[in-house]
Amino acid sequence: MFYYDSTYILVLIGAALVLIAQGLVKSAFSSYSRVRSTSGMTGAEAAQRTLHDNGIYDVKVQHISGSLTDHFNPATKTVNLSDSVYGASTVAAIAVACHECGHAMQHNEEYFPLKLRSAIVPAANIGSKAGLPILFAGIIFSFHPVVFLGILLFTFGVAFQIVTLPVEFNASARALAYLENSGLVADSELAGSKKVLRAAALTYVASAASAILSLLRLILISRGNGGRRRD
C-alpha cells in the first residue's frame, strides 16, 4: 500500500501550496479585472503595441477561449489571450497581455532559459507520464534498475518546472519594465499590475515546490522498499 504511506504528507503539502497559489492569482486577477485602465486599451491592443514597441512584427495576437489560459506559442508565433484579457480594458488584462509579450521578447532574443525549457519538453512529457508507472512497476517486481529509471524519468518533469521559474520571472520583469516606461498604464495602476504578475509567479513557484516534494517522496519510497528487501 505504498500509495498511502507516511510520505504522502509531502504530496498533500505540495497540493496545498498549489491550491493557495491558485487562489491568490484568481483573487488578484479578479480584483484588478474590475479596475478599468485609464488608457482604455484592451489586452489585445496593449499586446500589439508592446510587440511593435519592442521591434517584434512577426508575432500575431489572437483570442482563445477559457479563463487564465493566456500563453505565447513560439511554434506558431502567436500571443494567445483569453476571454477576460483579449477584449478587456482593465489593469489585470493589460498586465497579463504584456507578460505574454515578455515571452515573445525572450523568443525574439533567443533567451537561453526559454530555449532550455523548450529543449526538455519532450523528455518532461515522457517523464511526467511514464515515470510513476515505471517506478512502481520496479517496486512491485523488486527490480531496482527499473525503480531508478522511473525516478530519472520523473526528474525530467521536475526539471521542467524548475527551469520554468526564471522564464516566467523574466517575462514579468520585462512586462513591468515596459509598463513603467511606456505610459501604457498610469502610475497609480502600476501597483495593481505588479500584484497580478507577482500572484501569477507564485503559481509557478508552488508548482515547482510540489514537483520537488513529489520527487522526494518517490526517492523515500524507493529507499524504504530497498531496505525492506534487504531485511
Image (cartoon, rainbow, N blue to C red):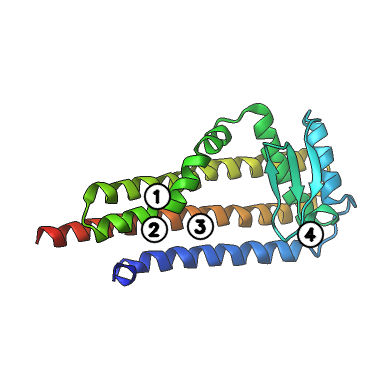
Q: List x then y, in percent, for residue 4.
A: 33, 72
Q: List x then y, in percent, for residue 104.
A: 70, 36
Q: List x then y, in percent, for residue 90.
A: 82, 57
Q: Looking at the picture, which amino acid does disc 2 mark?
A: Ser
Q: Quadrant of residue 108?
A: top right
Taking 223 as reference, is 183 left or right?
Answer: right
Which element carries disc 2, helix, strand or loop? helix
Taking 218 as reference, is 195 left or right?
Answer: right
Residue labelled with disc 2: 214
The residue at 74%/66% (across/down) is 31
Q: Looking at the picture, which amino acid does disc 3 mark?
A: Ala
The residue at 70%/44% (across/down) is 100
Disc number lying in front (2 or 1): 1
Pick the residue in front: 71 or 22.
71
The answer to which of marks 2 and 4 sits earlier in the sequence is 4
Q: So how many labels did they put on this image?
A: 4
Callout 3: few (<14), some (14-19), or many (20+) C-alpha neighbours within 10 Å? many
